[in-house]
Image (cartoon, rainbow, N blue to C red):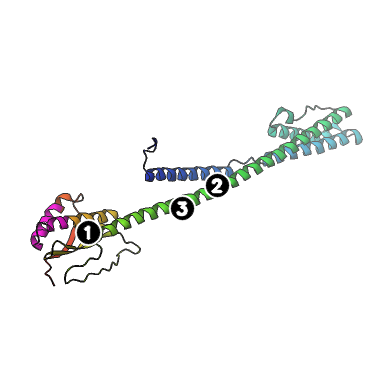
Amino acid sequence: MRRGTNLPERSRRTTVTLALVAGLVAAFVYATYLSYWAGVYTSDAFKYQTAVVSAQRDSELLETEQFDRRAQPEELRRYEVLLATDMRRIDDIAETPAERAPHFSLPASAQDYDNLTTELSLRQTLGEARFNATIAQNTKTRNLSNALFALVALLFAVTVGRLRATIEEGRSLVERLQRAFISKRREVPSVDIGSVLISATRGSNVGGDTFDAFTLDGKHGMFLVADVSGKGIEAAVDTALIKYTMRTLFSAEVDPGALLSKFARIYEKTAENPETFVVLFVRSSFPHS
C-alpha cells in the first residue's frame, strides 16, 4: 500500500468540496470588486481634455483681442482670467509633469502665443493618450470580470453537482444499511409474511421501523415489529441493535414477557440518548402446522 493515502475517500471529497466552495466565494467577491470598484474613472481624463481645449480657445481669443483688435488692458482682463482659470484646471487634473500646464506670462508677445499653442497641442495629444489608456484599462478590467463570473458559474455548477452526489451517496448508503437490517421474507411454519412501508416523511425511506421473522428450531419462532423514536441513520442503526439483541435473547428465552423484560434492561443501558425509546410487538413460539 502506498503511503500518503491515510485520509478516507469521504474526507478527501469533503476537502475538495470545501475548496471548491472557498474558490467560488473568492472568485465571486473579486469579480464583483472588478465590476464595481476596480474600474478607472474616465471623468478625469475627459475633464483634462476639456481644460486643454478651453485653454486653446481662450488663448486664441486673448491673442485676437490683443493684436487684431488692440483692446485696452481693462478689456483684456476678462480673457486673461479665463486663460488663467484654464491653466489651473490643467494643473489640477494633470497626472504627470508632462501633462502640467505650460508656462505662460502676461503681457505676452506673438511668439509667446505661438509657443503656447504648440505646448497646448502637445497636452492635447497627451490627454488623448490618457483617455484611450483609461478606456483600454476599463475594457481589460471588464473582460477579466466577465471571465471570473464565467468561472464562478462553472464552479457553482461543479460544487452543486458534488454536493448532490454526496447527498445521494449518503442517502443510498443509509438506505442500503436499513435494507440490510430489515429481514428478508422467510418461511415460518403456518405463517405468511408480507410488509408495506408508508413513510411519515415524504420521500424518506430511512428511519426506525423494522420487523423480523426468526425461526429458532422446528417448534419455536419469533415475529417482531418495532419502531424506534427519531429518524435518519441513528434510528436506522438502532433497528439493528433491536433485531439482533432480540434474536440473541430469544435463543435463551422464548417467553415473550421475559424476553421483553430482558431487552428493556439491555436497551436502557445501551441507548446513548436518554430520551430515545422503542415500541415493540413480539410474538413467539409458533406451533407446527
| Residue situated furthest right in the rendering | 68
- Please tell me in which quadrant of the rendered image residue 34 appears: top right
| Residues packed near mark 3 inside 10 Å, few (<14), some (14 to 19) or many (20 plus) | few
Residue linked to disc 3: 161
| Residues packed near mark 2 inside 10 Å, few (<14), some (14 to 19) or many (20 plus) | some
Q: In this rendering, would 245 be left or right of 26? A: left
Give the mark nearer the N terminus: 3 vs 1.
3
Question: How many labels sit on residues?
Answer: 3
C-alpha gap between disc 3 and disc 2: 15 Å
List x then y, in percent, for residue 160: 46, 52
Q: Are marks 3 and 2 in contact (CB under 8 Å)?
A: no
Residue linked to disc 1: 228
List x then y, in percent, for residue 161: 46, 53
Q: In this rendering, would 119 be left or right of 134? A: right
Give the mark nearer the N terminus: 3 vs 2.
2
Q: Quadrant of the N terminus?
A: top left
Residue linked to disc 2: 151
Q: Is residue 90 magenta?
A: no
C-alpha gap between disc 1 and disc 2: 47 Å
- Please tell me in which quadrant of the rendered image residue 78 appears: top right
Give the mark nearer the N terminus: 1 vs 2.
2
On screen, residue 112 above or below 197: above
Q: Magenta residues?
A: 245-266
Along the line of sight, the residue nearer the viewer: 266 or 143: 266
Which residue is at 42% across, 53% downward?
A: 165
Q: Nearer the viewer, mark 3 or mark 2?
A: 3
